[in-house]
Image (spheres, rainbow, N blue to C red):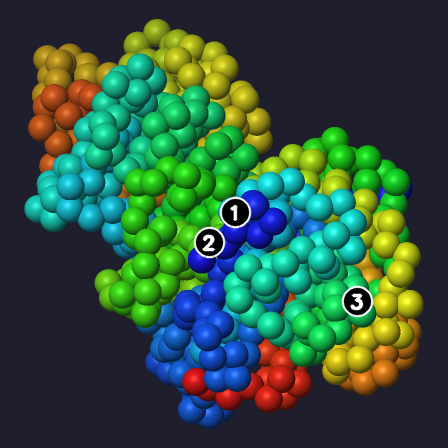
Amino acid sequence: MQLTVNGTPVFVHTGGREIDSARPAARPAIVLIHGAGMDHSVWSLQSRYLAHHGRSVLAVDLPGHGRSGGEPLDSIAAIADWVIALLDAAGLERAALIGHSMGALVALDAAARHGTRVEAVALLGVAERMPVHPDLLAAAHAGEQSAIEMVIGWGHGPRGHGGAQGGSCPTPGLALIPGGRRLMASIRPGVLGVDLAACNEYGQGADAAASVACPALFLLGALDKMTPAKAGRALAARVKSSQVVVLPQTGHMVMTEAPDAVLDTLTSFLSLRRG
Amino acid sequence: MAGAKFLKFDTQSLHAGQRPDPATGARAVPIHLTSSYVFSDVDQAAALFNLERPGHIYSRISNPTVAVLEERLATLEGGVGAVCTASGQAAMTLAIMTLMGAGGHIVASSSIYGGSRNLLAYTLPRFGITTTFVHPRDLDGIRAAIRPETRLVFGEVLGNPGLEVLDVPKVAAIAHQAGIPLMIDSTFTTPYLCRPFEHGADIVMHSCTKWLGGHGTAIGGVVIDGGRFDWESSGKFPTLTEPYAGYHGIDFSEEYGPAAFIARARAEGLRDFGACMSPMNAFQILQGVETLPLRMKCHIHNARKVVCFLEGELNAAKGAVAWVSYPELVDHPDHALASRLLPHGAGSIISFGIRASGQGGGEGGSREAGRRFIESLTLFSHLANVGDAKSLVIHPASTTHAQLDAEALAAAGVGEDMIRLSIGLEDCEDLIDDLKQALRAATKG
């Protein structure tokens, strides 16, 4: 679905069913917010399920990403404000926000500053701070392949990397690491650098967590090297009403490495039912 | 700052796609001989059928044993995903059916496996899909053959049986300029020798029956998606970019991004055409893939020794060899290209011409000499296969390429005198001794 947000064309994947903004009580909205250098397709193992379980789904391509126009926004706060503008453009008063990594910071910040618009947040692969190594930042700004290799390499746990105890993508026949590599390679050069800089510079995580009034679910990978589960737990402890689920044998790419566990947890958290 | 670490090719040959069986701890890949899978509840069943959750429904569409092989081959090639099929021919058919319907057109190398040629030249036209064949070295010809309705460029890294080397980067550029993908049959080279995605190809297929399986036991194929081709921008592939009623209006490109092609190949192609791989065959092929790096090293070592021997025969007075074709030879037309694309070796197929002698000279004489040569071999097996652990031999003009007329035979570089060897893993001294005695026997009469 195409929307116009702040004058810029935006692409939103709706999981195979149209959103129902006229009857928000019948199918409450969920916005899925991807991480740095990615797009809506990282949610392919969640968006279709959610859309067929009572929710209007907006798996968005952030500005400058995927099929959306415009330039990438350079701060977490700016993206959070943009998500609220997206709700306005879609005619939605409230939505649950599900974010991964950079998208999780966006969801957190939006819930803290726009509390009346946010029903609940589910934060995947998140920490209060997401410092980015200067070498990675420089490579990402330069559009170098090595930046993608670092993000994909560190981002995946054993289900992506394989090895004696790992291996085996949840989706039959797919390979997680080449898939992630190709997705990131399709993003415009330089976009990853803007995204990572926004993560690196975000210092309001602790305060934002303390301001979140809605229910918050933290879905953390036990083997996450980018946002370690310990850091996610610490952030969750600052939220008034939080639930933490740590997924074993899972790295940072929680929704592609452990899609069934993510869906099962969301089903319980959001009281999802087929329909 | 240390870069990210990834497991290397030899390690992935053993481990990619597998973890110890969670139920039993089995280290080897279990053979899941089951047609179907119990649903945990009605909602999970509905979610699987509507592509909302990943998982297995019915072994025609996916199977845990086959999935290990698919993920392993995708990983070794660097592709985003793979679908294994009943044979290499099924893989090729599946790829074509996923990309186009009636009215579609293919530009294919004229030097390809005879079975692939039959499919493209004789069978697919019955379904409205036509092919123009172009010599693999004729890059201008490939460009000129592309029409508005062309949906695929197809070739083999190493032509069969002429051993022409396809300039994959240049052909990929030609295809991409026209907004269409390049599919490579990489059977002869395997990902150990060449990874076509790194050279610009978009789809790779193999007959797994050959070097991947490596033991001549199981028939199978695979089609692998490189995930790089932009179907949306091309605008020529409605199967991947427009709603599909077969899954309630799903748009595969929108839903799966880089994995759109392989997702449709499974969701529609295996579901409806049904040419799936048996889990037993997947297990057999997995055993082969585990030792692929070791075997390929030995195949290449032996092939180089045999080429050296045949060169000696070629240069000897009254030698029985009329010509030798192997891309590593300096007089091979694609020698420089082979050095770039195939630095670890140019495969283990060797073509050579047998010299007719005495009154039986000429074309008919070549065929007769070829017959005597093949029937005199004691170690090489005469059969229609390549890439076995055992060494093999065949006379293409009368077998694998027999359906081609004289013109097509010439275009494919198949002469009456051509002998094709597939060099196996025996001691190469034994192989050379066998060739030596058979050449003597062939030229006696």
Return the chain for callout 2.
A
Residue drawn at 12 percent across, 18 percent down: B363
Q: Where is residue B254 in the image (x, y as percent from the top left)?
A: 45, 55
Tag 1 near tag 2, CB within 8 Å: yes
Return the chain for callout 1.
A
Return the chain for callout 3.
A
| Residue B327: quarter of image | top left
> From where the camera sits, is residue B4 visible?
no
**Same chain letter for marks 1 and 3:** yes
Quote the CA–CA distance across marks 1 and 3: 25 Å
**Looking at this view, is B243 or B367 the one in front?**
B243
Of the numbered discs 3 and 2, the one sitting upstream in the chain is 2
Q: How many labels does the image show?
A: 3
**Disc ID at residue A9:** 1
Q: Position of residue B50 (x, y in %)?
A: 39, 75
Residue that label 2 marks: A2
Of the numbered discs 1 and 3, the one sitting upstream in the chain is 1
Going by the numbered disc 1, the residue's amino acid type is Pro
Q: Is mark 1 on a helix, strand or loop?
A: strand
Q: What element carries label 3?
A: helix
